[in-house]
Amino acid sequence: MTVLGSSSTSAPATRKKITGHVGFSNLPNQIRRKSFKDGFQLTVMVVGESGLGKTTLINTLFNSTICVPREPLHPAADRPKTVAIENIQADIEENGVRLRLTVVDTPGFGDFVNNSKSWNPILEDIERRFEAYLSQEHRVRRGKLVDSRVHACVYFIQPTGHSLKQIDIEFMQKLHHRVNLIPVIAKADTMTDEDIVDFKARILSDLELHGINIFQAPIYEDDDDESIFEAEEIARAIPFAIVGSSNAVRTRDGRVVRGRAYPWGVVEVDNPAHCDFGKLRQLLIRTNMEELREHTNDVLFEAWRTERLLAMGIAQDPTVFEEINPAERLREERVIHEAKLAKMEVAMKEVFREKVELQEQKLKQSEVELYARHKEIKDELNRQWEDLSKKKAQLESGSPDASRKKTFRA
Ligand SMILES: Nc1nc2c(ncn2[C@@H]2O[C@H](COP(=O)(O)OP(=O)(O)OP(=O)(O)O)[C@@H](O)[C@H]2O)c(=O)[nH]1
Ligand SMILES: [Mg+2]
């Protein structure tokens, strides 16, 4: 068994052999068991002008009637005044894996005379879901968080063959930093293959021109060649040219497929030579559902959360989250240590100088005192000398004092 080991934060990981079975190779199975138990939550939003095939696509994706198509409105009927937000929830199961799917339909988008703010109710709904998640995170008892955030927004582009419309650009510009955008060309069976290639190129250049970010499925270098090839193929096909239909039709060669029948033949939904439906399904459900959820949580929600908390006046110290470079950290610590040493050296020198100065002063003081004492003794001796000299002189000169004898009584 091989493990990667590292003894310090800055040392590179080394490969080590361990003997015996530790048990962590079972981790994927634990996750698998937990996933079976908990199931998954996915929320997909569909946005696009009326009649572009949103409902049909959802039903085709999950191969069941999740949404019931709406009756087209009579031209004379009263139209709603704003975009509606409709949630359709379905618990679906495949090979024991449960998926709680929420489809957010947005009927009414682009239906008005003035569509300049059509994106607003949709943006508000996405942010309301962020808000609901944030308030769950802030609870003391959190339990299992219910994630109703929108993980992907499939945006339907009308198959005009020209370029993006103003409403498309505005919507994507307003929403791309809040949701994973997946643009699709609706009803691609109404266009020729060549027109689709040109239209895709024009859409991509429009997106770039307007600085719109769309969801990019990551390509993992360490995947096997087949997975890398598949991921690259999906990335190349964006914006997906979609055909939706849950109807079973018979092809000229007798096969029964999901598709749309025309006098000139059948457009097969699941045939990659006919449309990109399979690639969209691959990205949304088969290979990138986890990346969509991760990107929603780690990037989009996090950015919104930061803006929200900043607006509430709660600032966070970004340095706390900075990645630590061990070499840089060591260098910083060495500089701090050296500065500390230099400071201590200066302080010690100062103390030494003060002590020397004090000692010098003391010595000087003693010298002065010694000199004064010396002078005092010298003066005293001089004075005694003079006294004695005087007395000697008197004695020698025979003064009465000198002849006086001491008398003692018997
Ligand atoms: N040619 C063609 N027709 C389609 C396709 N998808 C759906 N339709 C048809 O377009 C019509 C509208 O489809 P819906 O799925 O109800 O469209 P919608 O976008 O949900 O419409 P609203 O709910 O009114 O906004 C139906 O008659 C569908 O059969 C497609 O890929 N190609
Ligand atoms: Mg619909």
Image (cartoon, rainbow, N blue to C red):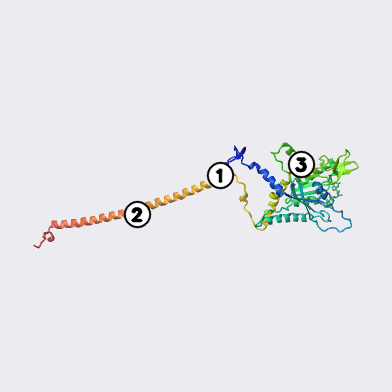
Q: Residue 240 falls in which quadrant of the image?
A: top right
The first of marks 2 and 1 along the sequence is 1
Label 2 sits on residue:
365
Q: Badge 3 local density, few (<14 within 10 Å), some, or many (20+)?
A: many
Between marks 2 and 1, how big is the CA–CA gap?
Answer: 52 Å
The first of marks 3 and 2 along the sequence is 3
Q: Badge 2 local density, few (<14 within 10 Å), some, or many (20+)?
A: few
The quarter of the image holding the N terminus is top right
Q: Is residue 141 above or below residue 181?
A: below
Amino acid residing under circle 2? Gln
Q: Look at discs 1 and 3 and give the one toward the viewer.
A: 3
x and y percentages locating residue 352 in the rendered image: 42, 50
For mark 2, give the secondary structure.
helix
x and y percentages locating residue 103 in the rendered image: 78, 51
For mark 3, give the secondary structure.
helix
Label 1 sits on residue:
330
Q: Look at discs 3 and 2 and give the one toward the viewer.
A: 3
Q: Is residue 315 above or below residue 202?
A: below
The first of marks 1 and 3 along the sequence is 3
